[in-house]
Amino acid sequence: PLKLHEVNKQNHNKTKLSFDEFKAYFADGVLSGEELHELFHTIDTHNTDNLDTEELCEYFSQHLGEYKNVLSVLEDLNITVLRAMDKTKKDYQEASNLEQFVTRFLLKETLNQLQSLQSSLECAMETTEEQTRQERQDPAKPEMPSIQWPGKRSARRLQRNNSLSPNSPHFSTGWIEEDSQWMTQINRLQKLIDRLEKKDLKLEPFEEEVLEENARSHIMIVQRQMSVIEEEIKEFRLALKQYVESASTQGGCLHISIQKLPSDSRFIVYEFWENSNVWNSHLQMNYSKTFQRSNVDFLETPELITTMLVPGK
């Protein structure tokens, strides 16, 4: 099994694995320490209080089942992908623009397929772990893993769309969530938390807010994330400038802010509108439709649009 190979690699020339090392590698957050100890002695057929590679492989090989074929295919896939990467490295520089485009497309498609497979496996892992936790009646505390294995998610990735529906005018543009986008937001939140922790916070007791008649109840915040093709950045900036100038003159537009991420050609536009009705009307204006149509040529991927209503007060 692949994990056994990793264990062996991590321990270099060691041929024995102590219980503490076994627990560090194989604790899964479900089995308790006692259960892991029982499993350790079950595998230790030589009764040496240490496990060697032969004992580990013999035990897991008996329980591979359908995954024997899966691991075999993964090994072949690994070799095939590495071979393709090696050939790409040698040929890409001398290839024509069209051939380079095809290579980039195939790389992206291969990555998408592998990520889709990884997502399915991660969901299966989480489902089986959660199901086991619910079924277990044993109150024993599970042994938490001390090593974060590559590919295992520390939190579930949620892909939700609470504020947009298929009937929204912009639904057809689509949206994509990327890890780098999440990390950017997480880092910003972490900085905010660090700043707050340095101040004495005074939390007010719960109070019901009674809205005055004709008071602005909620405003609409719109975040638009756009990954621009490198060669089209200049034209995109002009189109974005015209869009912002037109939108800013509309009644009900409170503020528009633009951020350019330094690491890549990604732009984030924040729009503040008096309410959702004003924003929906803005989407139907000619300047807004013109900007959306131009983005078809300017963007690498469909833009990601997120909306949120916040109390106007």
Image (spheres, rainbow, N blue to C red):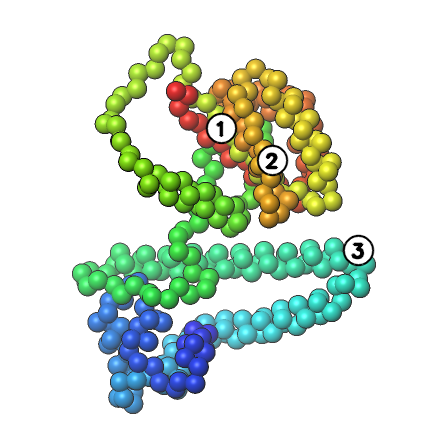
Dot label at residue 97: 3
Corner quadrant of residue 138: bottom left
User: Which amino acid, mark 2?
Assistant: Ser
Nearer mark to the viewer, of 2 and 3: 3
Corner quadrant of residue 298: top right
Mark closer to the chain start, 2 or 1: 2
How crowded is the residue under tag 2: few (<14 C-alpha within 10 Å), some, or many (20+)? few
Residue 107 % position (x, y): 65, 59
User: Which amino acid, mark 3?
Assistant: Asn
Corner quadrant of residue 253: top right
Q: Quadrant of the C terminus?
A: top left
Circle 1 SS class: strand
Residues under labels 2 and 1: Cα distance?
20 Å
Q: Nearer the viewer, residue 59 or 141?
A: 141
234 w.r.t. 86: above or below = above
21 w.r.t. 197: above or below = below
The residue to which callout 1 is attached is 221
Residues under labels 3 and 1: Cα distance?
41 Å
Residue 97 % position (x, y): 79, 55
Q: Nearer the viewer, residue 193 or 37?
A: 193
Q: Residue at x 58, y 33 (%)?
A: 258
User: Which amino acid, mark 1?
Assistant: Ile
Circle 3 SS class: helix
The residue to which callout 2 is attached is 172
